[in-house]
Amino acid sequence: MLIQAVFAAARDVFSPALRRILWKSLALTMALLALVWLGLTRLFDWFLDGTTVAAEYPILEGFAFFLAGFGIFVALVYLLPAVTAIVAGYFLDDVAEVIERGDYPADPPGTALPMGSAILYGLRFAGLSILVNLAALLLFFIPGINIGVFFVANAYLLGREYFELAAGRFWPQAEVTGMRMEHRGTVLAAGAVLAGLVLVPVLNLVTPIFGAALMVHLHKRLAHRADKWPRIPASSDAPHLK
């Protein structure tokens, strides 16, 4: 089931139907990363200007700039899950509508979250992701543990976030949580796929759209297996299930 959802999502990400959404998602993701990078560099410049060691020892200043460049890169990697959460909250409903209409025309349509609620949900998760990844960042210099902690933490967080966004189009929060807990192993495995994608340079930029597509397919397959709703004619104007 999960493997089928992964292949379906990979097919959808670069499909003509989602291409426009993908370009907009890439633009927003890179813009947010640029803002984060700018903020981190300004913070470092402020810190360096406030110290006297760099002025007295130019060699140390050059070494500090080298370390800062590496540190900023590492920080961006650890902050990327939070950035993808914000982008996913903004675009998930657009992705879901395309996939639901194209791949599941016989199912009742989902209802999009209000834009403000979707963005606030993404920001809330982004804040949680930042806290968790900052804690993981403290273990960065412990080989064998740093990547493992980063991977497991983000597998859980990304699986939870994306699944709840996709399932929330159809069910109240209590039912969404119940479905996620009932299938927590599958959701965690899907989150592990996303956490692995985050670690791949360049390809990690498509995480918001791929993650949205993956969880839309996964939610649909889980709901169908549990027979949570009846099949309806594609031409019917079905009411929302909530």
Image (tube, rainbow, N blue to C red):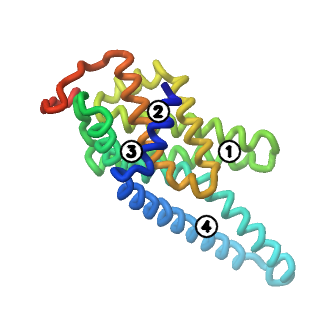
Total label count? 4
**Disc 2 or disc 3, which is closer to the eye?**
2
Q: Residues within 10 Å of mark 4 (few under 14, many from 20)?
A: some
Q: Earlier in the sequence, mark 4 or mark 1?
A: 4
| Nearest to the observer: residue 40 or residue 195 | 195
Q: Earlier in the sequence, mark 2 or mark 1?
A: 2
* Residue 122 makes an appearance in the image: yes
Q: Residues within 10 Å of mark 3 (few under 14, many from 20)?
A: some
Left/right of residue 102 with respect to residue 193 in the rendered view: left
The residue singled out by tag 2 in the image is 5
Measured Cα–Cα span from mark 2 to mark 1: 29 Å
Q: Amino acid at mark 4?
A: Leu
Q: Secondary structure at mark 2?
A: helix
The residue singled out by tag 1 in the image is 136
Left/right of residue 74 with respect to residue 5 in the rendered view: right
Q: Are marks 2 and 1 in contact (CB under 8 Å)?
A: no
The residue singled out by tag 4 in the image is 40
Measured Cα–Cα span from mark 2 to mark 3: 24 Å
The residue singled out by tag 3 in the image is 121
**Disc 2 or disc 4, which is closer to the eye?**
2
Q: Secondary structure at mark 1?
A: helix
Q: Residue at x 63, y 71 (%)?
A: 41
Q: Earlier in the sequence, mark 2 or mark 3?
A: 2
Q: Amino acid at mark 3?
A: Tyr
Quarter in which the C terminus is drawn: top left
* x then y, percent, for residue 172: 30, 28
Q: Amino acid at mark 2?
A: Ala
* x then y, percent, for residue 155: 58, 36
Measured Cα–Cα span from mark 1 to mark 3: 22 Å
* x then y, percent, for residue 150: 66, 42
Q: Secondary structure at mark 4?
A: helix
